[in-house]
Structure formats: structure tokens, C-alpha cells
Image (spheres, helix red, strand yellow):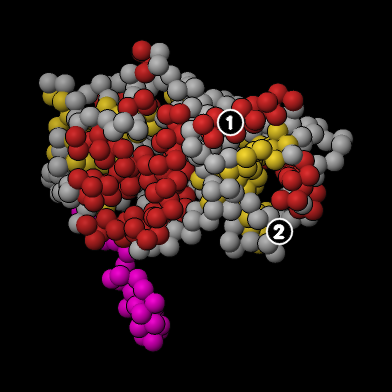
């Protein structure tokens, strides 16, 4: 059913009893042309572009748990493209353009709000790096600007910029076209589109191994039996090292826990997104009015389901110092996700050492913003067995050749 004002009216008159489910939970078939392992945002968008751009619909997305149970709905929903290197700028800016039309493309409101993203500078060195990034963004065609203190104060009046803070606030960069999107809506929108395209979405179907013969992938083993496929894509953010090990290769990733929390809803008082990698904090206000806080990663590797308490405590202290009017705010929920960072701070997007097996991994704390572009380029790579120009620089081989894409300064938090 196409969503429209008319369908809303019609269903409203029927007391909203006849909306069809967004997607049906499929039972695995014995074989597909392609299997996507992982039903997060990246897995779903890869399937979406395989179907819409390459006409491949005999495909399955197999998900260990439930759709939206992974990082896609655990993140703080920040979307921006103000990266340093031209390779990254092109990839993330392609994503930004796809975000801008996603609601129309999917006929599903993903609530993309281009409210701007600010990156704070706290030292002279930070200022230098912020200015360098602004210039690099402009050189790469990404509109970005430098904010001095008066301009920053006007844009974020609730930010404490007074003297006497542990790290003073000296200036910032602003990408006006950046913002946030409603992350669950992204999952539901893709799933609904995939349902219409005839793609199978299979939940509660953990992949436990790969069938490989003569250096080629032949299919996957799952808790619900084997599935044959000549093309398989691993898209399991946070579990990539574990799943790659099942296929017999290693990834240059370190894996750790990243936490976030939201407060009770309050009146609108923060109209943009504020990030500070030095303070290990990023803040925005959701459309419901909740303050959304992203915190620092744990300082050790692990796959834990609970983040370290001292990180929470430190972050809340930082909130009280830098946003003093939020001091009496009550927190409603806190959670974490497992993130995996590569040695150069850039993702791995392309072929694996096994023919027919593709890998999308290593997004650190920043893969949500790439969701549509990652799917777009991976679909191209899978369908044509060669990378799209946008993901060619992000191959796994770059760790052998040394052609790294150094984005270690571009993350929301230091990894
Ligand atoms: P996921 O949703 O995690 O999808 C992977 C799926 O694979 C999961 O559903 C998992 O269950 C499944 N899976 C794992 N193993 C198997 C298996 N063996 N078989 C089958 N399925 C399997 N990024 C941003 O750009 N902006 C942000 O503001 C931001 N904030 C973040 C805040 C936090 C607290 C966290 C944790 C992350 C944040 N990120 C952010 C990063 C972003 O969430 C991830 O990089 C991105 O969501 C990863 O892609 P995905 O959506 O496909 O991952
Ligand atoms: O990469 O923009 C980002 C981000 C913000 C919060 C977590 N990651």
C-alpha cells in the first residue's frame, strides 16, 4: 500500500484497523542468488539497491535477532559528511544526497532533519584542525564553515563557553546540511520496500558458518539450516571479526563497547547537533524532546552487553559542566552497541579473500550516516563483482598495500 494523505484518511475512517504489516517474516528457502548476512541498516540497504539498481530480487537478508536490534537503532542518528580525505568526503556526501531523498524513495518518513552539526574546538591545536577540516571540506565540495565564539554562542545559547572549564570552548565548525534521521524508521522503511520488491527478510536466523569450495563461497550455514548462494555479503557491524573468522580470514579491527543515553523529554532548546571528540560527548534533541547523549567508548576491547560505569559518570559530569541548565534532567534510558574500528579510521567495503564473499565492516562509531551509500556501493560490488569508484579506496587490500584512508581525526569519539 502506498502511503499518502488519501490512505491516511481512508485508514483513519476505518479506525486504523487495516494497515498491512510492513514486512512478512520469511522462512528460508534452500537457495538464493545472494544472501546478505545481517539485517541492520547496511544489510537492508544493500538488498534494497541490489533489487532496485541491479534487478536482483531472489535474495535474502538473514538476521541473527530481530530487525533493528543492532547498532542501526542503537546509534545517536547523526548524519554528516565533513570528513577530511577526498575518498571519504565523496562516500559520505553521496550518502547525504541519498538521505535527502530517502523519504520519497521509500515512501516512508525517515524524519531526516538537516539541523546542522557543530564540532567544538577546545585548544589551539583543535582550532587548527577544525579550520583545516573546514578548508578540506570546501575543497571537496562539502559546504562547511568556521564559527567563532560569538557565532557559536548565538547558535547554541545553552552551551557553557565561560572561563574555568576543564577544556575551554574556543570555536567550532558547522556543517549546515548535516543533521539527524529517525533510525528505526530507516529500518522499517527499507524492510517495507524490500517486502514489496520480493526480497526475503529472515529474522532469528544466525549464520554459523560458510560453505567454501575451491576458494569460492557456495552458501551459508545457519541455525535454521544451510542456504546455498554464490554471492554472500557480510554486513554484521560489531561482529565482523567473529563472522569473518567463520570464513577463515582475519580483519584489522578492534572491537569495543559504545554507550548512549536519553533523558526525559523537555521543551525544544537545542536546535542543532553538538559534538566534541575531545570531551567524548555528542548531544542532540530528538523530535520528541528527549536529550540524546552519546558517550565515550570503553578503553578496552570486548563484546560486553554493558558499558563501563565510569564512562557514564564522566560523561554526565561533562554534561553538567558544559550544559549547566541540563543539570536536573532525569535520564530515561541507557544502552550500548558494539563498534569496531579499523587501523585508519575508515571502513572496509568490498571483496573478501574468498571469491563471491563480500565484506562491509569497520565503521567505528560512525556508520549510520553512511547507510544508504554503503548499501549502494556494496550492491554494485556484489552485482558486478568489482568495486564502485566510491568504495574502491576502501578495500581490505589497502592494509597490505599501505594505501590507507586516514580518518582517525574524523570520528565522533576517539577510538
Ligand atoms: P547493525 O544494525 O548492528 O547490523 C548488523 C546486524 O548483523 C545486527 O542486527 C546483528 O544482529 C546481525 N548479525 C551479527 N552477527 C550475525 C550472524 N552471525 N548472523 C546473522 N546476523 C548477524 N553512526 C553514525 O553515523 N552516527 C551516529 O550518531 C552514531 N552513533 C552511534 C552511537 C552508538 C551508541 C553506537 C553503538 C553506534 C553509533 N554509530 C553512529 C555507529 C552506527 O550505529 C553503526 O556504524 C551502523 O549502524 C552499523 O551498520 P548497521 O546498521 O548495518 O549495523
Ligand atoms: O560519526 O558523526 C558520527 C557520530 C556521532 C555520534 C557517533 N558517531
x, y percent for residue 203: 30, 51
- The N terminus lies in which quarter of the figure? bottom left
Residue 323 position (above or below residue 87)? below
Please identify, in this view, whether the residue under mark 1 or under mark 2 is nearer the observer. 1
Q: From which residue to which does the magenta span run?
A: 1-27
x, y percent for residue 295: 63, 39
Q: Quadrant for residue 118, please give it.
A: top right
x, y percent for residue 211: 18, 30
The residue depicted at 51 percent of the width and 39 percent of the height is 142
x, y percent for residue 139: 51, 31
Residue 93 versus residue 181: which sits nearer the camera?
Answer: 93
Mark 1–mark 2 distance (CA, rounded to whole Å): 30 Å
Regarding residue 44, the answer to whether it shows in the image is: yes
Asked if marks 1 and 2 touch (Cβ < 8 Å), the reply is no
- SS for tag 1? helix
Regarding residue 17, the answer to whether it shows in the image is: no
Mark 1: few, some, or many residues within 10 Å (few <14, many ≥20)? some
Comes first in the chain, label 1 or label 2: 1
Residue 135: give its label: 1
Residue 246: give its label: none
Left or right: 382, with 277 as reference point: left
The residue depicted at 27 percent of the width and 47 percent of the height is 49
Q: Kindly identify which residue carries mark 2.
A: 269
Q: Does the magenta stretch mainly form a helix, a strand or a loop? A: loop
- The C terminus lies in which quarter of the figure? top right
Q: Is residue 25 magenta?
A: yes
The residue depicted at 77 percent of the width and 36 percent of the height is 169
Residue 153 versus residue 8: which sits nearer the camera?
Answer: 153
Amino acid at each position: 500500500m502506498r502511503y499518502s494523505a488519501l490512505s491516511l484518511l481512508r485508514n483513519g475512517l476505518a479506525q486504523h484497523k487495516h494497515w498491512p504489516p510492513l514486512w512478512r517474516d520469511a522462512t528460508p528457502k534452500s537457495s538464493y542468488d545472494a544472501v546478505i548476512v545481517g539485517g541492520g541498516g547496511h544489510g537492508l540497504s544493500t538488498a534494497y539497491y541490489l533489487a532496485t539498481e541491479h534487478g536482483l530480487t531472489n535474495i535474502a537478508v538473514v538476521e541473527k535477532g530481530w530487525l533493528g536490534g543492532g547498532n542501526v537503532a542503537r546509534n545517536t542518528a547523526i548524519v554528516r559528511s565533513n570528513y577530511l580525505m577526498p575518498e571519504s568526503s565523496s562516500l559520505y556526501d553521496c550518502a547525504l544526497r541519498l538521505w535527502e531523498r530517502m523519504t520519497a524513495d521509500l515512501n516512508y518518513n525517515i524524519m531526516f532533519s538537516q539541523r546542522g552539526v557543530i564540532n567544538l574546538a577546545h585548544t589551539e591545536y583543535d582550532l587548527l584542525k577544525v579550520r583545516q577540516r573546514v578548508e578540506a571540506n570546501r575543497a571537496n565540495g562539502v559546504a562547511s564553515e568556521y564559527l567563532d565564539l560569538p557565532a557559536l554562542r548565538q547558535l547554541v545559547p545553552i552551551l557553557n563557553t565561560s572561563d574555568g572549564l576543564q577544556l575551554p570552548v574556543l570555536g567550532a565548525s558547522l556543517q549546515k546540511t548535516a543533521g539527524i534521521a529517525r533510525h528505526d524508521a530507516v529500518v522499517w522503511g527499507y524492510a517495507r520496500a524490500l517486502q514489496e520488491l520480493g526480497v526475503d527478510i529472515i529474522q532469528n536466523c544466525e549464520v554459523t558458518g560458510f560453505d567454501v569450495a575451491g576458494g569460492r563461497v557456495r552458501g551459508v550455514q545457519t541455525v535454521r539450516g544451510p542456504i546455498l548462494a554464490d554471492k554472500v555479503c557480510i554486513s554484521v557491524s560489531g561482529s565482523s571479526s567473529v563472522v569473518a573468522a567463520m570464513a577463515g580470514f582475519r580483519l584489522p579491527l578492534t572491537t569495543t563497547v559504545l554507550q548512549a543515553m536519553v533523558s526525559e523529554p523537555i521543551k525544544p532548546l537545542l536546535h542543532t547537533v553538538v559534538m566534541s571528540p575531545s570531551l567524548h560527548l555528542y548531544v542532540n534533541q530528538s523530535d520528541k524532546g528527549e536529550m540524546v547523549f552519546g558517550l565515550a567508548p570503553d578503553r578496552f576491547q570486548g563484546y560486553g552487553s554493558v558499558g563501563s560505569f565510569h564512562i557514564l559518570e564522566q560523561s554526565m559530569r561533562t554534561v553538567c559542566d558544559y550544559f549547566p541548565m541540563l543539570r536536573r534532567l532525569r535520564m530515561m534510558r541507557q544502552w550500548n552497541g558494539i563498534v569496531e574500528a579499523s587501523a585508519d579510521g575508515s571502513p572496509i567495503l568490498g571483496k573478501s579473500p574468498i571469491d563471491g564473499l563480500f565484506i562491509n565492516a569497520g565503521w567505528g562509531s560512525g556508520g549510520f550516516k553512511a547507510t544508504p551509500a554503503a548499501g549502494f556501493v556494496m550492491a554494485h560490488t556484489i552485482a558486478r563483482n568489482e568495486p564502485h569508484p566510491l568504495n574502491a579506496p576502501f578495500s581490505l587490500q589497502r592494509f597490505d598495500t599501505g594505501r590507507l584512508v586516514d580518518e582517525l581525526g574524523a570520528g565522533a569519539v576517539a577510538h
